[in-house]
Image (cartoon, grey):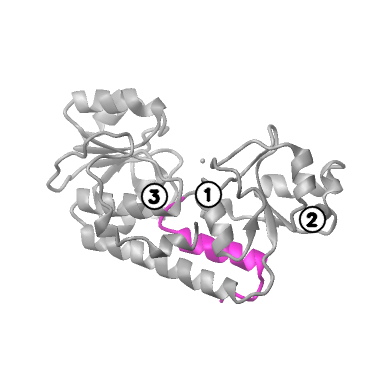
Amino acid sequence: MAAIVLFACAAPSERVPSVDDAGDPLPALARPSRIVSLNPATTEILFASGAGDRVVGRTHWDGWPPEVLDVPDLGDGIRPSIETVIGARPDLVVLYASGENRDAARALRAAGIAVISLRIDRIVDFERAATLLGDAVGEPERARAVVDSVRATLERVRVAAAARRSRPTVFMLSWETPLMTIGSGSFLSELVEIAGGRNVFGDLAGPSPQVAFEEVLRRDPDFILGRPETAGKLGANARWRGLPAVRDGHVLVMDTVLVGRPGVRLGEAAVSIARLLHPGVIP
């Protein structure tokens, strides 16, 4: 791995922190010329902000924009190979902010490489990360333009969806065994709300909490949103057919490539979900 409030937040320039999401001081950078990004969402931001030609390393999970595939694949973004990353000769490494990457951050700094650790769970995190990275790589205006463009699309979707009288309830199936959904701590829950739906597990704080199947039955969602490899199987499962949404054919398949990460295509992701929930409403 709230929607309305984000549009009333302060301007991005007012939210630039002095530390990264791991609590480490932000490095003093002029204009880094060789950047390794080990977080697909931040890789998208760097390319959209005009720094893509300076990205010299990525993870094997990166796939957008298409030209990112020309960048050397340095492996996973969690517990990366320090030797491999140093071998790319970066002057800046962008890590996913997690406890599992703390040793990597320390090792890279000890090698004289600047590190920024970022964790993007919600839309406001994306805005902050884009603004911070834009400043760090010397592209502040282009980064702010990316944030403004995403905000504008999200607002367009929200306004169009709000005109609908119906606001269907939605269960987002994240994983089957154990059964996991999307809680209010995830940008996906925000996207569903913006797209004119209501997350039936929006009262759970985490981004991807585990839930009991009996509780899904009790909350009786109007629609189920799932991954292509999972959603198509529900109708053949006797247990899942106990849900009216499954029996009525209200299982919707998300474009997980598009909606799977909180990057620069958040607006497009909201459009795709809105079109599933309210066909014909979003042009």
Local crowd size for mark 1, using a 10 Å CA cut-off: few (<14), some (14–19), many (≥20): some
Local crowd size for mark 2, using a 10 Å CA cut-off: few (<14), some (14–19), many (≥20): many
Q: Which residue is mark 2?
A: 245
Occupied quadrant, residue 24: top left
Q: Amino acid at mark 2?
A: Ala
Which one is nearer the viewer's eye here, 78 or 63? 78
Local crowd size for mark 3, using a 10 Å CA cut-off: few (<14), some (14–19), many (≥20): some
Please tell me the numbered disc located at residue 125: 3
Residue 137 in percent (x, y) is at 21, 50
Q: Which residues are magenta?
A: 262-283
Instruction: Compute the Cα span from label 1 to label 2.
Output: 23 Å
Magenta-colored stretch includes residue 281: yes
- Say above or below: 234 vs 194: above
What residue sits 52% from the left and 47% below the top? 186
What residue sits 75% from the left and 45% below the top? 216
Q: Which residue is mark 1?
A: 260
Could you tell me which secondary element the residue under label 3 belongs to? helix
- Say above or below: 31 vs 117: below
Q: Is residue 256 left or right of residue 139?
A: right
What residue sits 60% from the left and 77% below the top? 163
Residue 260 in percent (x, y) is at 53, 49
Which one is nearer the viewer's eye here, 160 or 34? 160
Instruction: Compute the Cα span from label 1 to label 3.
Output: 15 Å
Instruction: Compute the Cα span from label 2 to label 3.
Output: 33 Å
